[in-house]
Image (cartoon, grey):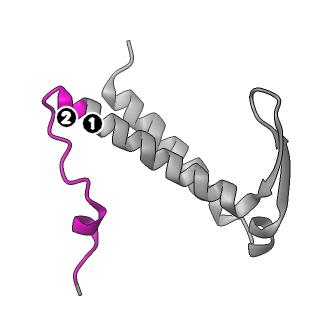
Amino acid sequence: MTTFTALSEERRQLDSTIIAWYEQLSASDLNHKLAYRNMKGVASVKNYGSLMLHFFNHQTHHGGQTTTLLSQQGLDVGITDLLALIPSH
């Protein structure tokens, strides 16, 4: 059975992979057009930088879903409002 601790560690490892991938990208990488097919086989050509924006935004979307489900189960997920996490100067 998977535990929360094991899932947390897996998430940390995935985040490290994402950060390493992001750090090696250049501005020219973000400006090129990527031709691909989605899981249904539909062809598209889109700006890579915009696709990365979608990638990170989509994680936020699912994080919100997870937070909602945990909250509905009575678990305190702590502060999730980005504004509260930004340090004051």
User: Magenta residues, as a range?
Assistant: 70-88
Q: Which mark is residue 68?
A: 1
Query: Is residue 42 shown left or right of residue 23?
Result: right
> Do tag 1 and tag 2 residues touch (Cβ < 8 Å)?
yes
Most foreground residue, 82 or 46: 46
| Helix, strand or loop under label 1 | helix
Place of residue 15 in the rendered image (x, y in percent of width and height, measured from the top left)? 51, 48
Residue at the spot 54% in from the left edge and 42% down from the top edge: 14
| Up/down of 8 relative to 4, above or below | below
Which quadrant of the rendered structure holds the C terminus?
bottom left
Q: Is residue 32 above or below residue 79?
A: below
**x and y, in percent, of residue 6 in the image:** 39, 28
Residue for point 83% across, 65% down: 32
Name the residue at the bottom extreme. 89
Looking at the rendered structure, the secondary structure element under dot 2 is: helix
The amino acid marked with disc number 2 is Ser
Residue type at the position of mark 1: Thr
**Residue 3 position in % (x across, y down):** 33, 22
Residue 13 colored magenta?
no
Left or right: where 34 falls relative to 83 = right
Q: Which residue matches tag 2?
A: 71
Q: Residue at x 27, y 68 (%)?
A: 83
Q: Which mark is residue 59?
A: none
Tell me the quadrant of the picture where the N terminus can be found.
top left
Neighbours of disc 1 within 10 Å: few (<14), some (14-19), many (20+) = some
Q: Is residue 25 above or below residue 78?
A: below
- Residue 53 versus residue 3: which sits nearer the camera? 53
Question: Label 1 vs label 2: CA separation?
Answer: 5 Å
Q: Main secondary structure of the magenta part?
A: loop
86 is within the stretch colored magenta: yes
